[in-house]
Amino acid sequence: MASAVALACVIAVPVAGRNGATAAEAIPNFMPDTTTGWVLDRSNHDDLLPPASGPGPVTFDKAHPYIPNGGGRQPTYRVADLTNPILQPWAKEQMQKANDQVLAGKMPFRARELCWPIGVPGFAIFSAVEPTYFLQKKDEIVLVNYGGPEIRRVRLNVPHSANPKPSWYGESVGHYENGDTLVIDTIGVTTRTFVDNFRTPHTERLHVIERYKLAGDGKAIEISLEVDDPGAFTTKWSARQRWVRAQIPMTETHCNENNEDIFNLYPVPSPKAEKPDF
Amino acid sequence: MQHAFFRAGSLVAGLIFAAVIGGTAAIAGGATQDISGVWSVTKYDPRLQIVGGGALPLNAMGKEAYAKNRAGLRDGSIVDAARKFCVPDGIPRVLASPYPFEIIQAPPGQVTIIYELNHQIRTVAMDKKQKTYEELVPYPFYNGHSVGRWEGDTLVVDTAGFNEKTFLDAAGAPHSDMLTTVERWRKISPTQLENVVTITDPYYYTRPFQVRFVYNQSNVRLEDYVCGEPHRDISKIQGVRIPPQVPADDPTFK
């Protein structure tokens, strides 16, 4: 059975290489059928995880442990560990204010909870429960997380444009590697996003490389992230996560339903249009 | 709200199209055609225009509901949630969207339609049997539950199981949870796509009726769409009227 799954997850098709050459190349098939989605492996926690070695992402302050929802214990909001040496002073200062608000009992901003796009690299941890799907076209991959739904697009085997206009998910280009990995290179992410759920800011110089590698006979995706932003961080850093395969069909969901902030708790309102577009 | 009185009737009338959908028969009906790509409606109309002309065939309850919707949308007592909160528009309203949409014929066994407007996603399960009214009622969706099949060069999409939070059009044409739609998508030229939609809702309408949309192939890429933010310029699309915009607050995330 395991080998059948593995076979279903690799397909061989002619693809154009990054240098423009065409060759028959095995590419990983992240959505072999209508029900294959990928959910966070919550046994791993639902944040960016530190790498095996080297600088890593912001995690929680040990004095205020983060306890996620769903574990049978009283969940807590995230308080960031500001001793992480990757943070430049201005970023640390901004995050201190956010920490103070949480410690004062306020609800912190989290994109998924308030129906805002999360950007990149946060997409890897956008939703703790809703699956992500890969719609694989010849020249593009459309990634859909049903927690929004949030949609981002990755053009394959093309270079970045010279000056991409900042957007919620930036400009992503990608390619396949080794028959089992999708590599995504992203720039141009709007500074309105954070890089994680600890409200770690970034600048317009953010550059992220994501690697989505099929693992475990096609039952998991090992995600590795490389993050570079000389405007916000003292050094390049990396992170990891893991998604596991879930057989859940794409089902209509919409985050922005019945989200009026009637108790005035939200740190920012959910998206709403005061005037219609047309 | 469910209309129990009509429930039995809906099985017969509302889901009549479902009866003709059979997995193997559908597969034999026609090979998959390529209608993938980005498409943009040729013109926008806030009101449904019936094929052959004439007014919506509303019954007495439909006329009452329509008048109430129109008055409520005008005076603000009814919120157009699709525009204010950017929840899905429902079928057929989303088919009239002046924003582009993309058809992706993947994964195998599914046609996926992504609308830039409100980042709506429709999935069409190919060669599956439509569920019954009773099976769908516990799971009402804005854009319903869709199954599809190829008939020659035409993708036939049968949709049922709608919630009652949407209008059929921007003017407030009503529908109930007995609504069913059958869309017939086909290329009418190398660069144009047609969708003829048969709309059936015996609760509010005296008979099924049809509307037609035509789309041009587009070379744009779909963009992020967040409610209340500036989006692409759609003012050039015939029929679109842009209301005066209030500059959106930029929420302070910091």
Image (cartoon, rainbow, N blue to C red):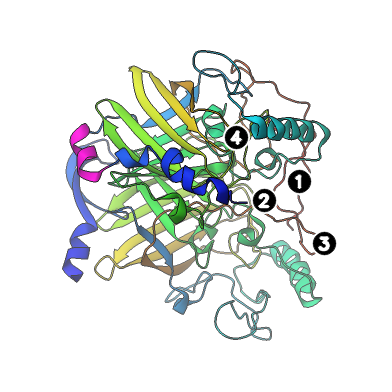
Drawn side of residue B71 relative to residue A29, left or right: right
Asked if residue B6 is positioned above or below residue A130 in the image, the reply reads above
**Callout 4 and callout 2 share a chain:** no
Q: Which mark is residue B136?
A: none
Kind of residue at badge 2: Arg
Give the foreground label among 3 and 4: 4
Q: CA distance from mark 3 to mark 4?
A: 39 Å
**Callout 1 and callout 3 share a chain:** no
Q: Earlier in the sequence, mark 1 or mark 4?
A: 4
Q: Label 4's element?
A: loop
Q: CA distance from mark 4 to mark 2?
A: 45 Å
Is the C-beta separation of discs 2 and 1 under 8 Å? yes
Q: Which residues are magenta?
A: B22-29
Which residue is denoted by mark 3 in the rendering?
A264
Main SS category, magenta section: helix
Q: CA distance from mark 1 to mark 4?
A: 42 Å
Kind of residue at badge 3: Asn
Pick the residue in front: A145 or A91.
A145
Picture quadrant of residue A31: bottom left
Give the letter of the chain under mark 3.
Answer: A
Which residue is denoted by mark 2 in the rendering?
A192
Asked if residue B56 is positioned above or below residue A155 in the image, the reply reads above
